[in-house]
Amino acid sequence: MPSKSNVAMLEKVASSLESSQGLFVVDYRGLSVKETQQVRRALREAGAEMKVYKNNIVKIALENAGMPNIDEMLAGTCAYVFFEKDPVDAAKVIKEQSEKLKKMAFVGAIADGKALSAEEAKAYADLPNRDQLMGMLAGLISGFARDIAVCVKEVPAGLARTVNAVSEQKQAA
């Protein structure tokens, strides 16, 4: 029979999985308490949360939730970064903190319903986030609107120049 602490931890992991869109698995070996607090604070600002659970409990919770199998990633000193909405924001924070502290690394992830390798998880950090994508889209729409306005304006202007040229030719003749 499982211990009460393991049952409680399983419930916490299940709750974290329910309230998130996915998770990143990171190796946090060597982080001091102060550095861990710094990472957690930065992740919170990005809409994510870093938790440390027993790997075997996470395996059970993922299986119970019907999520992809990442058992081979769940070994050693793992921390789990649960993200609420955008995996890109959380990945950017993890990458930034790992480069800054030189003590963290991507192990893998579950994002968009798929298991991801460490390289695939890290690649999320190089993608534009939702706000950046919206800005890019707004720029594209603005550019198209400007081009259409120039074309629409050019039609009557060209017609006026042609009529003026014909008029000048007839006056000259």
Image (spheres, helix red, strand yellow):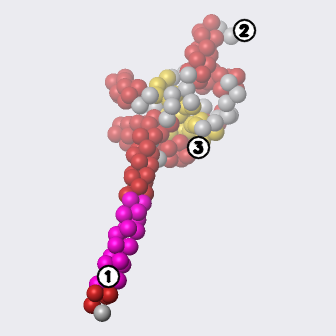
The numbered mark at residue 167 is 1
Q: The disc labelled 2 sits on which kind of residue?
A: Met
Q: Residues within 10 Å of mark 2 (few under 14, many from 20)?
A: few
Q: Is residue 11 above or below residue 146?
A: above
Name the residue tied to disc 2: 1
Amino acid on which disc 1 is placed = Ser
Q: Position of residue 16 (x, y in %)?
A: 56, 21
SS of the residue under disc 1: helix
- Give the distance between the C-alpha atoms of the residues marked 3 and 2, in whole angstroms: 34 Å
**Disc 1 vs disc 3: which is toward the camera?**
1
**What residue type is disc 3 on?**
Ser
Coordinates of residue 8 in the picture (x, y in percent): 60, 10
Q: Which residue is mark 3?
A: 117
Mark 1 → mark 2, Cα distance in angstroms:
99 Å
Q: What residue sits 50% from the left and 44% below the top?
A: 124
* Rendered position, 66 above or below 101: above
Marks 1 and 2, the one that precedes in the sequence: 2
Q: Is residue 84 left or right of residue 150?
A: right
Which region shows up in magenta?
147-168
- The answer to which of 120 and 88 lies nearer the viewer is 88
- Residue 171: quadrant of the picture: bottom left
- Report, in whole angstroms, how far the alpha carbon at label 1 lies from the one at label 3: 72 Å
Tell me if mark 1 has few (under 14), some (14-19) or many (20+) residues whose alpha carbon lies within 10 angstroms of its own: few
- SS majority, magenta: helix
128 or 156: nearer the eye? 156
The answer to whether residue 19 of the structure is visible from this angle is: yes
Work out which quarter of the rendered image holds the C terminus and state it.
bottom left
